[in-house]
Amino acid sequence: MSTSQDLKALYHCVYNLNYHLVLVTKYRKRCISNVILKRLQAIFERLCQQWDCELLEFNGERDHVHLLVSLNPKVEPSKFVNNLKTVSSRLIRKEFSTDLAQVYFKPVFWSRSYCILTCGGAPLSVIKQYLEQQQRE
């Protein structure tokens, strides 16, 4: 995982799109063990590569995980998150079925909701001030 803040480029644009994503387990059940957390990290790293994105940081607690991801501008954040949740839930439920059967009686893992926040770059007040100072012709 890289912590580089360098700009990335495609043939038609230069970008640096970083998002803080929080995923919560269904009913906030405290079912994420250290083994599951490590497996989730591997799953998310692989999925980010498939989407031509980068997982910059990852960590979590018993009932939620935090991801810092750098997305490609061609990627729709909502579709990306949906894919992360769907694939990781399916794999975790399959690989840790015995552990999760004690917590969930239905085939679930993640809550339907999630939190995604943009991050990095200048604060909005600085950008607003810069735009206000632009000269009109």
Image (spheres, rainbow, N blue to C red):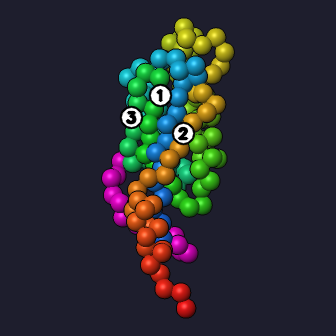
Q: Position of residue 18 (x, y in %)?
A: 46, 54
In depth, the one of 132 and 39 nearer the eye is 132
Q: Which mark is residue 64?
A: 1
Q: Position of residue 35 (x, y in %)?
A: 40, 23
Pointer 2 residue = 115
The residue carrying pointer 2 sits among few (fewer than 14), some (14 to 19) or many (20 or more) residues within 10 Å by Cα, namely few
Pointer 3 residue = 59
The residue carrying pointer 3 sits among few (fewer than 14), some (14 to 19) or many (20 or more) residues within 10 Å by Cα, namely some
- Give the amino acid at mark 3: Asn
- Give the amino acid at mark 1: His
Element on which disc 2 rests: strand
Tell me if residue 134 is in the magenta stretch: no
- Of badges 1 and 2, the one in the foreground is 2
What is the spatial separation of the Cα atoms under label 3 and label 1, in whole angstroms? Answer: 9 Å
Tell me the quarter of the picture where residue 91 sits: top right
Q: Which mark is residue 103?
A: none
Residue lying at the far right in this picture: please name it: 106
Left or right of 83, for residue 123: left
- Give the amino acid at mark 2: Cys
Mark 2 or mark 1, which is nearer the start of the sequence?
1
Element on which disc 3 rests: strand
Q: Position of residue 52 (x, y in %)?
A: 52, 55
Element on which disc 1 rests: strand
Q: Which residues are magenta?
A: 1-13
| Quarter of the picture holding the C terminus | bottom right
User: Is residue 73 in sight in this rendering?
Assistant: yes
| Tag 3 and tag 1, C-beta contact below 8 Å | no
Q: Residue at 47% across / 23% down in the picture? A: 63
Q: Residue at 54% across / 50% down in the picture? A: 50
Mark 1 or mark 3, which is nearer the start of the sequence?
3
What is the spatial separation of the Cα atoms under label 1 and label 2, in whole angstroms? Answer: 11 Å
